[in-house]
Image (cartoon, rainbow, N blue to C red):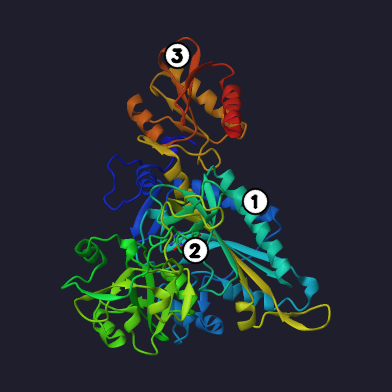
Amino acid sequence: MRWSRFFLQTVREVPADADAVSHILLTRAGMLRRVSAGVYSLTPLGLKAHRKAEAIVREEMNRAGALEVELPILQPRELWEESGRWSRYAAEEILFHLTDRKGGEYCLAPTAEEAVTSMVRAGVTSYRQLPVTLYQIRTKFRDEIRPRFGLMRGREFLMYDGYSFDADTEGLDRSYRAQEAAYRRIFERCGLDFTVVDADSGAIGGSASQEFMVLASTGEDAVVRCPACGYGANLEKARTGPRPVPWEDETITGMQEVETPGRGGIESVVEFLGITASRMIKCLVYETEKGCVVALLRGDLDANEVALKNALGVDHLALASEEKVEPATGAPVGFVGPHALPEGIRVIADESVRGAVNAVTGAGRRDWHVRGFATERDARVDDWAEIAQARAGDPCPRCGKPLEIARGIEVGHIFKLGTKYSTALKCEFTDEKGDTKPAVMGTYGIGVGRTMAAAIEQHHDADGIVWPLALAPFAVEIVSLNSADEATRQAGDALYEALAASGTEVFYDDRDERPGVKFKDADLLGFPLRVNVGGRALKDGNLELVTRHDRKVRLVPKDGAAEAVRKALEELAAR
Ligand code: ATP
Ligand code: MG
């Protein structure tokens, strides 16, 4: 492709709305144009990279035996009522929905479990037709609260979504593992440094779930990892081993009240009494659809609200507002006492307060705390659970060594769904014994644009993108140092034609611009290999070959340059 005939305009300034490196670079490289919040157009160059990522996904899924289908984007409300998800998605306001001329309601698909399940139930009747994994790579719509980071969190975005249907859970295990293996190949081919972590599967009622996280300081998700044994989970799912306790081998005292005027928050009590936060027990009051709940945690820890939701078996959970705390617990915020709660309010305690003695907590009345509190002696606990967030340095739940916390970008998700949708939508088959059973399902997703953006987050420098070969829109860029000079033009054209003829994806900067401008653009666009044609080198019968990732320059004879380029690309591919 000759730049002079291509539609591409690079941008010097950093766009005002761009908030991530990938977003800035994709915009500056002229690949992406914002249309509205979370809605983008891809230019020819942007689309080329996007298609590369898409093609890798398609190839690996076909290789894994999944079958491509096309499910509607425009989906009727009735279908979503069958699974019971319409109201939940509508309540979260994530669903884009609309009404047709006859008053029929529709949504723009945010995902497609219902649509695929209705396709399968119409065709599958016997266990002999299973297993089957169907997928599509199609646009999804989600009215994200905070669309940002360009392609990373759009409101309209391209997603691979796959769905497996098996006769039993052993079958689901196999289908799930086949997807996991395909995901690994996809992200490896994309040149990404990623880690697979356990994710929460509570809300949709599945039995296992993992996320593929690309490690990057700009990632929106926290990833908990153990460098010693390889344990990994996202923050919601992460567990820890037992933390060291501050009260070991102490003489147990009785409980006494101390006056703490105006000191409700943990920090101010700690300061006032001259103790550490780990000596405190905090009482968090939550509202749920099943009423108010008090959660007890050690003072130095934060609640993991997803774990808390799962432990309580509730769908809705939010910290109770200040006005609600006193009527529910008998004490204002900051002074709630676990030993002084009314009958009937449910109390759930984190494992971190099990066995606690000589602790400080609220007295159950304003401006007073108690010292010498002992959880099991003084409080009524209805449920024990692990409901505290993991912190860096906490012991690994598997091996006990210290955990690390890193930032990650979730590029893919695999999820064992079980029979929730197949039961609700009656996607059933008859097994060997003639019994009717719901199919056992898995659901799988990859963000195509997010993957492409994540690759840039990991592969860039101060001057621009450093494309991994597999995602680069073009493998090679020829830069003509002086398009007006006949010898330079001839040498550039000859190389361009030779490479194009042999199927190499080559971009030719044949514009009438100064070399400095072209070099800046070449660095910004970041194609893996660059060939400078002209100047001193050409006079000596040579061209300059520059690899983008290490900026190494070498001279190759003008004659046979095409061969040298192909060899250099092979070396890059093997890297
Ligand atoms: P997130 O937690 O980041 O909102 P999610 O868990 O809701 O994502 P899934 O429903 O698991 O997303 O979707 C599968 C994949 O689709 C994700 O792993 C991600 O790569 C991609 N994806 C999800 N939401 C978006 C979005 N708004 N823009 C771009 N890609 C997205
Ligand atoms: Mg997800």
Rendered view: 278 above or below 510: below
Badge 3 residue CB within 8 Å of ligand 1: no
Query: Residue at (43%, 49%) from the top-left corner?
Result: 43
In this view, which residue lies farthest toward the front? 251
What residue did someone put label 2 on? 237
Mark with earlier residue (3, 1): 1
* Amino acid on which the number 2 mark rests in the picture: Lys
Image side of residue 137 versus residue 342, left or right = right
Image side of residue 561 versus residue 31, left or right = right
Query: Residue at (50%, 82%) from the top-left corner?
Result: 77
Residue 96 visible in this rendered orientation of the protein: no
Q: How many marks?
A: 3
What residue did someone put label 3 on? 537
Image coords of residue 169 (percent x, y): 70, 70
What residue did someone put label 1 on? 59
What is the quadrant of the C terminus in the image? top right
Front residue of this view, candidates 198 and 219: 198
Mark with earlier residue (2, 1): 1
Image coords of residue 144 (percent x, y): 39, 66
Q: Give the SS element for disc 2.
A: loop
Tell me the mark number nearer the camera, choosing from 3 and 2: 2
Query: Residue at (53%, 74%) from the top-left corner?
Result: 204
Residue 14 visible in this rendered orientation of the protein: yes
Q: Are marks 3 and 1 in contact (CB under 8 Å)?
A: no
Q: CA distance from mark 3 to mark 1?
A: 41 Å
